Amino acid sequence: MEQNKIEAYRYQDEKSDKFWRIEFSGSALAVNYGKTGTIGKYQIKEFDDGEACEKEAEKLIASKLKKGYWVFEEFDPDKRLYFDDEEADLHPLTSHPKFRAHFTDELYYDCGDEEAPFGSDEGSDTLAQIAEDIRKSKTFDFAAFPKKVVETYWDMTYVPATDLSREAVEQLVKSDKGNLTQSDMVTYATAFAQIKITGRIGADLKAAALNAIKRMEITADVLKWNETGKPSEIALQMIRDLEAFPAS
């Protein structure tokens, strides 16, 4: 089996219709399975090396074929929704192929850096809530989600990043710092989550997220969070990468 090769299979009889998909890269293997037509579940498995991973992949495929599965030729990985294994950390193999191809820096899978999209509590909770909501409803509005999560789920006030002047940010820092920072972190986390899950992003959410990152940088400067006085490298990287990703 080749690195990063995706194998998808299907099984159907009078009682069931289900799919099973496998992909591996290096020493990590991902499987996605469930009822045909659904998102299904995702699982990540880590091995000591690539050889052990490949052997396990071949063993799993052979087992499915023995059970009567056949190659699912209509399966299109680009049209799938991608969710992380609930028992594992963020991983490229549980991210949309377009996300992993474009957002290559490790910061996009960082679960501990407060500046990373999903590294803060706000970012992590946003990603988890989006996954939960999408599984519950067939209709999901990414652009409206930042306001919804802040005001409906967290009972706070959403403050859109519309005025990026330093004077406006300084005033918000004095009067509404909590809502300000929460709103910005949730907004750009939602934008990266949309790409991670679906492989695309709407123009309105992209613009809002870029403004949120930029306003967060002004806030950090006002509050002297960065002792060097220089722009955050993580913020600059996120801006560059997001600007370069085409909206649809």
Image (cartoon, helix red, strand yellow):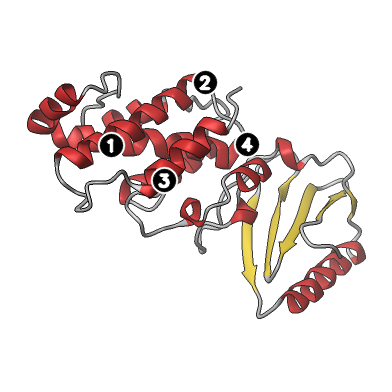
Q: CA distance from mark 4 to mark 1?
A: 25 Å
Amino acid carrying label 2: it is Ala
Residue 126 seen by the camera: no
SS class, disc 1: helix
Q: Residue at x 22, y 47 (%)?
A: 229
Q: Residue at x 17, y 22 (%)?
A: 168
Left or right of residue 9, residue 52 in this image: left
Percent from the top left, x then y, of residue 145? 41, 28
Of the two numbered discs 3 and 2 on the same chain, state the one appearing first in sequence. Answer: 3
Of the two numbered discs 4 and 3 on the same chain, state the one appearing first in sequence. Answer: 3
Percent from the top left, x then y, of residue 107? 46, 54
- According to the picture, the residue beneath numbered tag 1 turns out to be 216
- According to the picture, the residue beneath numbered tag 4 turns out to be 199
The N terminus, quarter of image: bottom right
Circle 1 Cα neighbour tier, 10 Å, few/some/many (<14 / 14–19 / ≥20): many
Mark 1 vs mark 2, foreground winner is 1
SS class, disc 2: helix
Left or right of residue 53, residue 152 in this image: left
Residue 185 seen by the camera: yes
Left or right of residue 172, residue 65 in this image: right
Circle 2 Cα neighbour tier, 10 Å, few/some/many (<14 / 14–19 / ≥20): few
Amino acid carrying label 1: it is Met
Q: CA distance from mark 3 to mark 2?
A: 18 Å
Of the two numbered discs 1 and 3 on the same chain, state the one appearing first in sequence. Answer: 3
Of the two numbered discs 1 and 2 on the same chain, state the one appearing first in sequence. Answer: 2
- According to the picture, the residue beneath numbered tag 3 turns out to be 117
Of the two numbered discs 4 and 1 on the same chain, state the one appearing first in sequence. Answer: 4
- According to the picture, the residue beneath numbered tag 2 turns out to be 203
CB within 8 Å, label 4 to label 3? no
